[in-house]
Amino acid sequence: MSFFLFAAFCAVAAAAAGVAVERRRDPDGRPGPEGPPDGDPAAGAAARVASPFEGAGLAMGLGDVVSADGAERWLAGAIELREGDHLVAVLFFAPEGARLDVVCAFAAPRRDVLWLSPVPVEVGAEPPSSIELGGVVMNRRARLPVSARRHGQGAPDVGELATFAEYEASARAAGVVLRGPGVALAWSGRRLEPEELDRMGRGDS
């Protein structure tokens, strides 16, 4: 191959590489996320849906496997809860047979996590100031009108607008009630400190 042909080949290769790099950049010029490993579309989709709240200082992300109390949970779905533009919390859903366990993570500066399981509940239009969840009487710690947005797989539909109520009792007992149009869901369990939760990485990688 002559010197001139070799130089032309190198120039074409460099241009193609530049186009590939630009395609990996976001519109603002920052590098974009890599594609799914080994062409796995599910892994790529999980990475993309995690992005709306991934930088909010949460203790976990969608697709993670986390463990506490000797049990592991794969966080397959999520409901993102916002008060206006402010991220309040994310309810992560972990399928366990027909049951959807929940891990509730809060936006910074809160660092505690709620390790919860579903319980039956009957509430009116307004979550009460005290309630029995999972056989424990709890007092309401917070009540917020929120917008709800689902991500991933298995997150129940509570509508676009809901009321998020957080409950607590002694011995770190905790609960959540999510009240949407025509639906009320509840979970009870306990509050964990960050060091009690083991984040084991992504379950789809």
Image: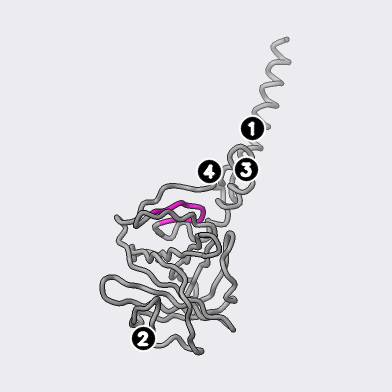
Amino acid tagged 1: Ala
Label 1 vs 3, first from the N-terminus:
1
Amino acid tagged 3: Asp
**Left/right of residue 173 with respect to residue 39 in the rendered view:** left
Disc number placed over residue 205 in the picture, else none: 4
Look at the image and give the residue range highlighted in magenta: 60-67
Q: Name which residue lies at 57% across and 62% down.
A: 151
**C-alpha span from label 1 to label 4:** 26 Å
Q: Nearer the viewer, mark 1 or mark 2?
A: 2
Label 1 vs 4, first from the N-terminus:
1
Disc number placed over residue 40 in the picture, else none: 3
From the image, tell me which residue sits under label 2: 130
Under tag 3, what secondary structure?
A: loop
Q: Is residue 156 above or below residue 72?
A: below
**C-alpha span from label 4 to label 3:** 9 Å
* Residue 77 locus on image (x, y percent): 54, 61
Q: Which quadrant does the N terminus fall into?
A: top right
